[in-house]
Amino acid sequence: MSTLTIRVRARPDETPSRWLWLVKWLLLIPHYVVLAFLGVAFVVLTLVAYVAVLFTGRYPEPVFQFNVGVLRWSWRVGYYGYQVLGTDRYPPFTLAEVPDYPAGLTIDGPPRPRRWLPLVAWLLAIPHLVILGALNGAAGWEIDDGDGAVRTVASLSVIGAAVLVVGLGLLFTGRRLTGLHDLLVGVGRWTLRTVAYVALLTDRYPPFRLDQGPAEPDDPDPVPRTAPPGGTAPATAGSPNRAAAVVAVVTGVLLVFTSVGLGAAGAAVLTLNGERDATGTLTSPTLNVASPTAAVTVEGVQPGDLWTGDLRTIGAVRVTATGDAGAGLFLGVARQRDVDTWLNGTAHDQLVQVYSEDGARYDRADGALRPVSAPADQRFWIAQASGAGTVELDWAGTAGTYAVVLANVDGSPGVTATTRVAMRVPDLAPLGWGLAGGATALAVLAFVLIYLGATGLGRRHTPAPPPPAPGPPTAAEARPPAAVG
């Protein structure tokens, strides 16, 4: 009898298709969608199992059956798809073991790990994760566009390159490269062992060994049984309704995503609220602006706050610009259409994105690189400020679309300044804590739904108990038959 707790099967097709691997990515989209939901449930239930093992020393069997089923499903998809390209038989949509499918996974269990293992399993697995990460990590090739920007044009991992060679071998020869197939199966087997250990599906530390080939090298019985320990027995009459279990898992996963979004929004709001000073003013980092044109603009500004869309409920915005000593600067706010008319035909830079204090992206408007008429002489400004040194512009916005303009007082080309923006905002703590509380409530509900749904699915694949052993014969059965005649 085998001493293994994890058995990975991988039986390649004898007559593979030359071209099918080119479109498997499209055929596998339904599986990728399902596995995205199952993967979230797998993580949630692994956390549940960690807590259960930590406090009880037991791995809940329904959780075990579900998590093994998820790993089994992912292995079938990977073997069919771009993890191995080992078979052309489409993988089934089931958590159960399918004995006649070319790829399979069984795990004896559930295990009885030591209570402290959840605290260190991930740490003990780091050497394996480093090796597997090196095999699956991508190396990139970069090119310089000539303007200082470097972009990655391609990236490929060792395993990705091996899969590509297998695919090209199929395309041009119609045969599978057995050596590469066995190598990819070995990496997949190593990965499954490591994931199973981290998820506490087994308490046996995975070996540092690349076991290649269709079956475990020391497993005398590579043929799957009809009801392996991983849980593939047919559902019993007492199993929960499958549709309800699936709905619970899907709803729970969607609530996880929603709670993560609400939690991130709450954290961002609370962080923003913490940046306010004693007067409730929020000040941006400085930005160094430099343009050879006659003006730098921020266009398409539509004032609004978090609730009503009316900036007046927030408070005035203050824009500060500091130029070189003796240089006169102008700051102004006007309706977008008026600024467009004034700068028509004149090149100017529109600020569209800020990366850092000295990093920003500008869009250059078409036109001649020439001066503009003195900005202070224009009558369309809603708010304006000018002077030498530091200039401050205060503006209480109203509904509409506006543009903010930074220029030299005389309208000459070559604008240079250090700028920042400050705005008085209300106390955002209630909103931030409300979002955080809502995220917590949804997360709890999501965990409950995922647990109920996933364990319901897991129970459907729990092996049926063995039939009771026959008892001792009764006295009547033990009495020898009477002689005839």
Image: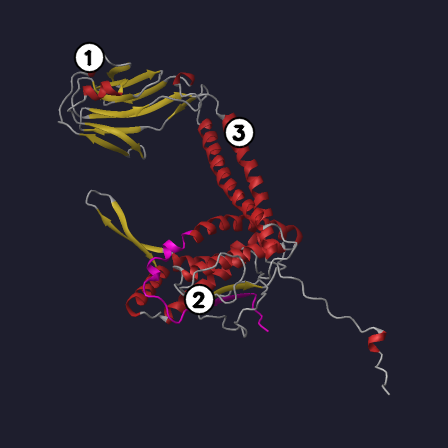
Whether residues under marks 2 and 1 lie with C-beta atoms below 8 angstroms apart, the answer is no
Instruction: Give the labeled residue for mark 2.
Output: 186
| Front-lying residue, 90 or 309 | 90
On the image, the x and y values in percent for residue 220 come to: 54, 75
Residue 416 coordinates in the image, percent (x, y): 22, 26
Q: Secondary structure at mark 1?
A: helix
Which residue is pictured at 38% across the width and 17% down the height? Answer: 316
User: Which callout, 2 or 1, points to the residue nearer the camera?
Assistant: 2
Q: Is residue 467 above or below residue 430?
A: below
Q: Read off the residue under disc 1.
A: 377
Could you tell which of marks 2 and 1 lies nearer the N-terminus? Answer: 2
Which residue is rendered at x = 29% and y = 53% of the image?
A: 154
Position of the N terminus, as image quadrant, is bottom right
Q: Residue 11, percent across and down?
A: 45, 69
Q: CA distance from mark 2 to mark 1?
A: 77 Å
Q: CA distance from mark 1 to mark 3?
A: 49 Å
Residue type at mark 3? Gly
Q: Nearer the viewer, residue 68 or 210?
A: 68
Amino acid identity at mark 1: Asp
How dense is the environment of label 2, judged by Cα within 10 Å: few (below 14), some, or many (20 and up)? many
| Identity, as a three-letter code, of the amino acid under mark 2 | Gly
Check the image and report above or below for 239 versus 164. above
Please report contact status of discs 1 and 3: CB closer than 8 Å, yes or no: no
Categorize mark 1 by other alpha carbons within 10 Å: few (<14), some (14-19), many (20+).
Answer: few
Label at residue 434: 3
What is the number of callouts on the image? 3
Q: Is residue 114 visible?
A: yes
Magenta residues, start to end? 1-29
